[in-house]
Amino acid sequence: MNNLRNSVRLIGNLGAAPEVKNLEKGNKVAKIALATNDSYTNAKGEKVTETQWHNLVAWGKTAEIAEKYLSKGSEVAIEGKLTSHSYTDKQGVKKYVTEVVVNEILMLDKKN
């Protein structure tokens, strides 16, 4: 059960191409916006779809794979862990950020 601690699994579509930065010593980091959809039928019998946006961060080889193979609209399954941190912006306001640090990416798009 230890591998269930702080484990996140999501399937969704990228809202934009991964934003990749090259860091010191050749390391890379990729920031990815992932949309997941949930559908239900409301009291009037209408189908309602709600979209949730998730901030993902991939490091090293995982970031390289994201940069090379993913683009806006790509469907992926990811596995990672939830992290939170805070910072103070230029106006002195404290901001809180929750992200999923990606361990694995599975590309689900159909091959042409």
Image: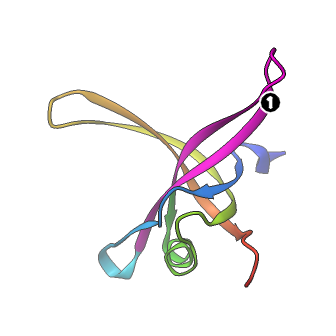
Q: Is residue 52 above or below residue 102?
A: above
Query: Picture coordinates of residue 48 (x, y %)?
Result: 73, 30
**Is-magenta flag for residue 42?**
yes
Amino acid at dot 1: Tyr
The secondary structure that dominates the magenta segment is strand
Depth order, front residue of 59/112: 112
Query: Picture coordinates of residue 69 (x, y %)?
Result: 58, 79
- Location of residue 101 by image quarter: bottom right
**Is-magenta flag for residue 95?**
no
| Left or right position of 38 against 33 | right
| Colour approach in the figure | rainbow
The residue positioned 67% from the left and 66% from the top of the image is 104
- Please state the extent of the stretch shown in magenta in the rendering: 28-56
* Circle 1 residue: 40
Circle 1 sits in a helix, a strand or a loop, which is it?
Answer: strand
- Location of residue 6 by image quarter: top right
